[in-house]
Image (cartoon, coloured by chain):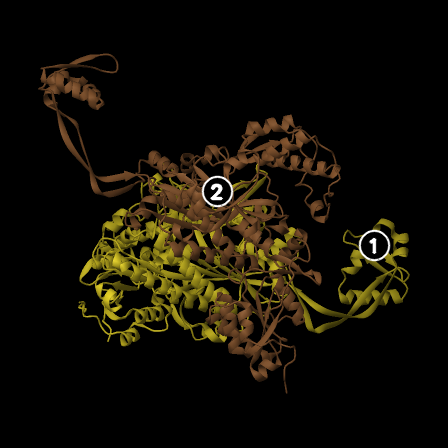
Chain colours: A yellow, B brown
Amino acid sequence: MSVQVNKTAHSFDKVRLDALLNRRFFYAPAFEIYGGIAGLYDYGPPGSALQANIIAEWRKHFIVEEGMLELDTTIMTPAPVFETSGHVARFADWMVKDTKTGDVLRADHLVKNVLEARLAGNLEARGAAAIPQNENDKKRKKKAAKVTATALEDSVVKEYETILAQLDNYSGPQLGELCRTHKIRNPDTDNEVGEPQQFNLMFASSIGPTGQHPGFLRPETAQGHFLNFSRLLEYNNGRVPFASAQIGRSFRNEISPRAGLLRVREFTMAEIEHYVDPEDKNHDKFKEVRDVELILLDRHVQESGSSETIRMKVGEAVDKGIIANETLGYFVARIYQFLVKIGINPERLRFRQHMANEMAHYATDCWDAEIHNSTGWTECVGCADRAAYDLSVHSAKTGHPLVVRQALKEPIVTEKEAVEWDKKTLGKTYKKEAGVIQKVVESLEEAALIKLKGELTQGAAVITSEDGKSFKLTPDILSIERKVFKQSIREFTPNVIEPSFGLGRILYTLLEHSFWSREQDVERGVLSIPPVVAPTKVLIVPLSARIEFDPLVQEVSTKLRRAGVFSRVDDSNTSIGKRYARNDELGTPYGVTIDFASVQNRTMTLRERDTMDQRIGPMDEVIATVTDLVNGSINWAEACQRLPAYDGVQAVD
Amino acid sequence: MSVQVNKTAHSFDKVRLDALLNRRFFYAPAFEIYGGIAGLYDYGPPGSALQANIIAEWRKHFIVEEGMLELDTTIMTPAPVFETSGHVARFADWMVKDTKTGDVLRADHLVKNVLEARLAGNLEARGAAAIPQNENDKKRKKKAAKVTATALEDSVVKEYETILAQLDNYSGPQLGELCRTHKIRNPDTDNEVGEPQQFNLMFASSIGPTGQHPGFLRPETAQGHFLNFSRLLEYNNGRVPFASAQIGRSFRNEISPRAGLLRVREFTMAEIEHYVDPEDKNHDKFKEVRDVELILLDRHVQESGSSETIRMKVGEAVDKGIIANETLGYFVARIYQFLVKIGINPERLRFRQHMANEMAHYATDCWDAEIHNSTGWTECVGCADRAAYDLSVHSAKTGHPLVVRQALKEPIVTEKEAVEWDKKTLGKTYKKEAGVIQKVVESLEEAALIKLKGELTQGAAVITSEDGKSFKLTPDILSIERKVFKQSIREFTPNVIEPSFGLGRILYTLLEHSFWSREQDVERGVLSIPPVVAPTKVLIVPLSARIEFDPLVQEVSTKLRRAGVFSRVDDSNTSIGKRYARNDELGTPYGVTIDFASVQNRTMTLRERDTMDQRIGPMDEVIATVTDLVNGSINWAEACQRLPAYDGVQAVD
């Protein structure tokens, strides 16, 4: 019934997409009229709305569905917090300086760019498809190293491929070694680069009028969760597992951001910290996701120098130990479901496990949701098992216990030897050394205590302190007896599973996956954003700005608002065709047209974005149909059964 | 029918409210386990949800209702932007230092605290009600100056009152003068304070690895709107009026924040920039709000040393010129409607006009929505007419025109004298001086040009340059003719009306206005937050955590979620009464109880928070009723007509 559309008639063209996003103000470089600052972007109306809708869906999918506890903590953070968390010492990238110009480059990106260019040049020299040097590449020449057609030895090709597969695994000195061994230079100047140095990625500031409190802008929202753990636990009536969630801005002072929204200095994150008993990482709802099939790239495959993925159900991946536990697996699957729901192409979504050296200092296992786009595979969501790291270090530093105290159903009953002192006699006999003696005895193992007990029943025993001094003990000083102990509370530091979403990266890759051009005209771009996150759901198009259409425009607009459907009116002075074309670029899935027939017969046409198919019906029926379409309760084929096709002609007196 | 409740049986007690908010984790000092930092707060689950609901309602009330263009711009801002906007030079408070300890105090707060304490002491000395020195005051002793019972001359009392009424109007040197004249010292130490000095309130940082770009954290979101003006205008098809809106974090490095959420260093704002033709500040929808009655405190009243308010309809206030124009009046009224809708007591809401010196450097008129609370009147929303200030300065600095170009319906036709040069002859005759001559002639007024034209028809004329040189001009060098000019485009810089909301202050005053204690027990606090913004709308209370209740809990929870009603389950191990009391503190307006009768008869009880009234009905009918209550389509009295009262006894086999 519904029209078929060829979305792949033209190959993906990033230049065209970027121009569209700029023209329609999805986003733009911040402070553009001041010349801009790399890595800072402002979202315009469609970009903000798309982001707000992704966030709303995220809230539903995670917070509401799982009953998570939402938080909103501060960005400005006093330095001691990040000293404890390890960020002051280790949240850094390796940078190298051009030895002549002083330009700063990120070391791993430099190695990647140069080796990839050499591999491409090798292919070209060997007569494979020449690398297209289109507008796009020219514009990005500062980013990509220049490709020169030079053949490489097979062994060199293999070596480069292995380096690239393991790139995230190298330390700074190793990257420096790679630059020397493989003569990697700054591609912009062909100058040598110096030794890699660490650059901390946190923005620094200071708090208060006298600068007494050094502070940092948070590079992630996570610490705000951890510091409030006790309050959250109490709010949850003292029980685990539970999760806290937060959506907010974070900051990373990237060394040289040049990849649009994929690498920025300020970004919106959505983070979950799921607190779980370290002895039981099973998940109640895991059975609901067991059969979700994922594309996986595990640690061992990468460490062997390969990038080959496998398809596997998450249940099987956990059963086989590829994914460490059910909770981690559950969130990996939920992340997958969320991304696909908002419009990410599942064929371009893989989960890659971190290699040993690559892992953040706090993580014990980590899987990244990577989304494929025109720049390659990009990490968009991290899903890490941070174990007890964060809660332990903050607890140790502040002395504030960040633990769960669980009443045991069956108290644990143990019998052991217990020492009882006659402190008066001990003190009188040994004065200052009494403390040392107590310490020595109380650190004795069970067997040694039993031995000591035996000796005491014989009248006396001799113990030796660490520094070799001997003391004689007698039964008037201490007695040792077997006693029964009952432990009814178990105290433990929960482990934390952290799904962490970079919303800007998700938003950008979603735009790439949604973009195509009409078969008949490559200039007519369309963003097929799913209705659930589309910035505007319905465009209301009066034939012209004539005053007689106003009451109907008002009526439709009010009725859609009451139905919870976000619409916009476009009564600008251009043809209806041009207005629809503009809204195809904005990703607006549906359009309704109000014309003279609407005034006379109260009919309205309904247009679907991708197919450009048009239907007609009474206004209220069109409103009801479009509401069902937007809410996902019917699809376009079903809508077509409700509303007849519009043949472009309407009876008007 | 419905029960009457006495909410004022106990007078407001801030200590009790603060304890409740802390206990239930509405918010708490950030980094508390690290000792905290003044002016930084984290919102816990109920606080985050309350904030999110206020934001959602704000979006509906302003952005959706008015079709505003939403933005999301960066917090980190390069210094040149704030140099141009004037913030680097002028966004500062006056601080004084204790001459001995070096402690830093905000100068105006110091004057206020000390004079208010003296006035209170005077009242006490004269036998009026002694100032209660309760727990609350003791805890806040660092904030309020100590009250000593000392009588003051009538003239001194009058003088202090005048100073306090005009406090926001003093410059730094004037504040210094006040401290000297009235012997105002640091109340904590009784030491003298030094001369007031300016302290810039922006947090500084630097962008990029080499520190090449100094930057600031934005103290307001406004500049992000202005810098994108051209793009926004284009998005709006080139027309004004229109508005942009943004909700986001801003930062102010307050000198010594000590008033909870009312004065913080990091806060969420919601800002609107409404762009309007400076020659037409009428508003299409003003007629819809003409009759909204407001409590006003205008500039002249304050400047005369009084704080007396008047009640007036906004229509009248604009007609009388008290509020400068319809657009400003429209937004003042819409702000009022919004605040009252979310639960602010309209009797404790006034609009205060800024005095001349008090106004921000960019504003030409400004009205603050001030909300009364236990600390006095607090500015929670500003509504300023920033005129063309911001767009003009950024445009001048960057050379990027931030203007509206409007096609005139009727072109403006003018006749004037036009000069035509024979450049060849001019050049040949005067060589290098040709430019000077052109400049002199073209800067002539109409009358002088006519005179010159007359002389030229006589054969020759003489002109004199600025530096006194004379040149002879002849008809072969230039001719002057009367010509008709047609101007069909009008170009202008729009004015900006800016409603700017401090969401944390609104949230806190809303909590104060919502708080009361049960008549029969002052320990039982209630937050009567309106359903529209309440963190949780419905509490689901199973009689116990027994497994037989689980399917019903699931069912009710799912049905409420589908109806768009946010609920939470409380199956903790305490009595139903205690669970309801806890949720009265959380402001949850409705509760449903699932018990053995629910399992057997599928009935459920519904409880209303304020009255504690309980009704009973079939589960689906209770769900439908509570959905209507939450959406505001029925009130409790109507709900009582649908559902019979619950007498506490249910038939169970």
The amino acid pointed to by label 1 is Ser
Quadrant of residue A636 in the image?
A: bottom left
Label 2 neighbour load within 10 Å: few <14, some 14-19, many 20+: many
Name the residue tied to disc 2: B367
> Front-most of B320 and B95?
B320
> Front-most of A555 and B385?
A555
Q: Is residue B362 above or below residue A482?
A: above
Name the residue tied to disc 1: A470
> Front-most of B17 and A320?
B17
Q: From where the camera sits, is residue B403 visible?
A: yes
* Tag nearer the camera, 1 or 2: 2
Looking at the image, residue A139 sits to the left or right of residue A488; the answer is left
User: What x and y, as percent, mark residue A236?
Assistant: 60, 65
> At 59% from the left edge and 60% from the top edge, which residue is drawn?
B528
Looking at the image, residue B189 sits to the left or right of residue A528; the answer is right
Quadrant of the image for the N terminus of chain B? bottom right
User: What x and y, as percent, mark residue B440?
Assistant: 21, 20
Looking at the image, residue A577 sits to the left or right of residue B251; the answer is left
> Front-most of B581 and A274?
B581
Task: Give the total number of marks visible in the rendering.
Answer: 2
Quadrant of residue A637 in the image?
A: bottom left
Give the letter of the chain under mark 2. Answer: B
Q: Is residue B221 above or below residue B448?
A: below
User: What x and y, as percent, mark residue B227?
Assistant: 36, 42
Give the letter of the chain under mark 1. Answer: A
User: What x and y, as percent, mark residue B86?
Assistant: 43, 34
